[in-house]
Image: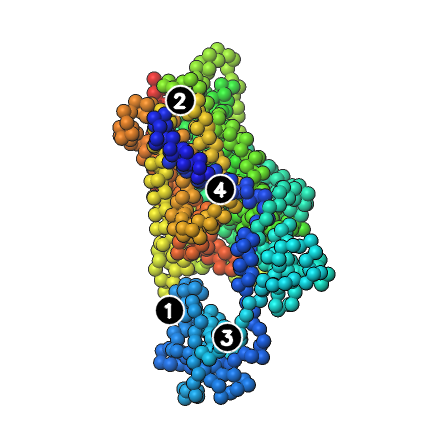
Amino acid sequence: MLVVFALATIWAFGFRNGQAYRLLYPALAVFLFCVVLPLGKNIAVSFSNASEDHLLSFSEAKKHILDRTYVASPEDSLRFVLYPDGELFRLFVSSPTTPNLLYQTAPLDIANANYVRTNRLSVEQLKYVNSPLVLTPIDGLPDEIPVPLRGVISRRLHLQALSFVLADDPEMRIMVMDGLRKLSYKVHRFLLPDTIPSQMTKNRSNIDLFLFDQKQDRYLFADFEKGEYRYLEANGTHSSDSITPGFNVYVGLDNYKRFFSDESLALGQVMVWTLVHTLVVVSGSLLLGVMLAFRLNRLPQNQRNVLSTTFLLPLICPLSALALTGKGIFNQNFGELNMLLIGLLDIRPDWFTTPILTKTMVSIIAIIAIYPWFLLTTRWLMQLAPGELMQEWRNGHLSRNSARFLSRPLILVATVVAIFVGTNLYLPPLITNGGPDIIGASVSVGTTDHLGSFLFRLAFEYRSLFGLAAALGCLILLLFSIPAIFVGHAVTRWLGEYRGSDVKVLNKLGRATESIDRCAAKPKPKRYAFSSIFSSAGVYLLALLILFPFFVLVYVSIRYQNYVPTERIGNLWNPLPIWEHVYSLNHWQMAFGMEFVEPDGRITPPPFPLGTWIWNGLKVGLLSSLLISLIAFGSAFSLTQLKSKYRHALLGTMVAVGALSVTPFIPGLYLLFEKFEQALPLIGLNSHLGLMVSYLPLSLPLAALTYWIGRRKLIEATGLFNAGVKMKWELVILFIASFILCFSESPLASLLLQDVDLLTPMVGLQQYLYPCNYLWGDFAAAALITTVLYALPLITLLVMVDRWIRTKGNRAAE
């Protein structure tokens, strides 16, 4: 990879023929290091046994095992007592066999558990942990009262991290805390043997692969078939016992074969559900979005504006917040939907434990989240349509010409949505975490897991089976790369990028209009009964259903309790009527970082630092979008200087990368960032800069989009600066689109960021709805605040794109 990058650098900046690619060079670097490198790592991992217990190399695992210690000869243990010394403490040690032999430490600042927890200190950050503390002989114990056992327990975390050595011990043996009042000697458990018994060495000539366990008095040998040290029996054969950690070894196609031979992995069930779920969600969203677009087109202007805004509301809600909102509303114990069903029909569906109900719930939430994109696409296409078609649609007609005009872009959008639905890490993980689990499965997999969420659970749950997850990622890539390549090629051709056309900008929509004009003499189209399908009453009822989650969020955010208040009637608990609830702004007050004073005087602090999360999201989003916009604009300008055949290939590749999500190679990406953290922590795990680097591949599809929306201006520009001046509004659109994508992203952020104070708001919202700490009211307030921050740039972007499309439509009409 480095050789290819170096050669590309020399060619682009050292040869005249490479001048056209210099501005494309950052995009090439992003493609190589942020797409090809993780993909290559993922492929390599798929041929290994990488897992939670087999991540290290052989030498690293061997060193880790040799460093392991254990407490030897407990009869030699020493008793210790902790005495106060002003604000500090001293450790006094005595021998049970020789009571008059006493030792003490220097004054120590030993932190209690509350201090460690409040300051979020790791063991490495505690004092005196880097070297053993010396115990010096003394004549007697002090007169003070020793620290009681409760005080020792509260400081046990710090005491257990310390090591001690006697000043007069010639062997300088290390002692550690072994109980609440005892110090014991620790020695290395595993040793490299000098000699091996003859019965152990048959067929094993390399003595460096042996270890000796002093505690069990047994030999071990490195098994390179399973990647672990295994104990040897007295006759020299391998036993079933092994030790961790194991080491990484090559296993060939075993991971791939296991998917097709091991029924306990349940890959067949996951693939069937992925196919069914994708078909249901894509077809349902497409049908609902297109029908709503046609129905809204026939309404008067004032009704159309109100209903259009209502039906596009799910679009302005971040997908993470929308999924978590659905999870809260459908909650079978505390959700408002079940409370409503109990009051009206006296039923309580088990949405999260009955597989068919769980699948129905996930599909409904997915359709609500996705149909606005089809609605918006159809409305924009209708604005670009010729007048004859517009008149047909207003009269409720749908002709073959109309279908021909709309089919290609809607098929492309449906293909991208299908890829997203089958591989996304938003809906099943956030709503159900894949559950309910499949009974009899040998790994973490549930009935609502599709291929993407199944991969994620394989890699980061149970035993972190990275090798198996990487193999599944390669299979997903093979499965979805075909539609992704189709999308890239089709979009490139549809938008007029043909081989041999360097300057002429073709308008595919214009060609479709000519085709429609040629077909004008054909028989009049049949009238479809849109009114019967979507009557006015039906449209308004659907609008109320779309508004229901938003009404619930507002209602829950101003309700005092986090749960629906109930009253006991007999043996049943029934929800109280809304007018009997207690209302307060306590959730909003805590969302803004302020403490809330309860009616009884207790002070409730904010449960989570939402303000810090929002700042993190804005910081990451703004800086990432700036980098992405610069790379995308430079690449778009460079594309105009390339030959048509090269430009066609690059544009198709960029769109294909954008159509595919990061899911297929997410195990390789995570392991790469884990390596980066060891070499350069600034761009490793738990780093905002590392997260921004992971967002850079977004610049590739956005570069293609920038090229298409501003191609004429880019061709006419005399230089990069002149092109920027000509395309100032297109660059604003590019920057806002980049910010929206980065600010609303959650799967990568939840994977790479681990500290609570470093989370972004989309990841932080998930912390409110843990089963053991279900803060539904606090979540509602936080979700509404986050939605407003997300909606403002999105609405700005949609207005600018809508005006740009109207301008194009007016020019086409002229």
Position of residue 685 in the picture relative to residue 248 (left or right): left
Which residue is rendered at x = 42% and y = 78% of the image? 105
Residue 115, by quadrant, is: bottom left
Q: CA distance from mark 4 to mark 3?
A: 49 Å
How far across and down, in percent of the image, does residue 491 sit?
Answer: 46, 26
Q: Are marks 3 and 1 in contact (CB under 8 Å)?
A: no
Image quadrant occupied by the C terminus: top left
Judged by depth in the image, the label closer to the viewer, 3 or 2, is 3
User: In terms of sequence position, does the residue under pointer 2 or pointer 1 come before the other?
Assistant: 1
> Mark 2 falls on what kind of element?
loop
Frontmost residue, 38 versus 521: 38
Q: Which residue is mark 3?
A: 171
Q: Which residue is mark 1?
A: 601
Numbered label attached to residue 24 = none
Q: Sequence-wise, which precedes: disc 1 or disc 4? A: 4
Q: Which residue was labeled with disc 2? A: 643
Q: CA distance from mark 2 to mark 4?
A: 29 Å
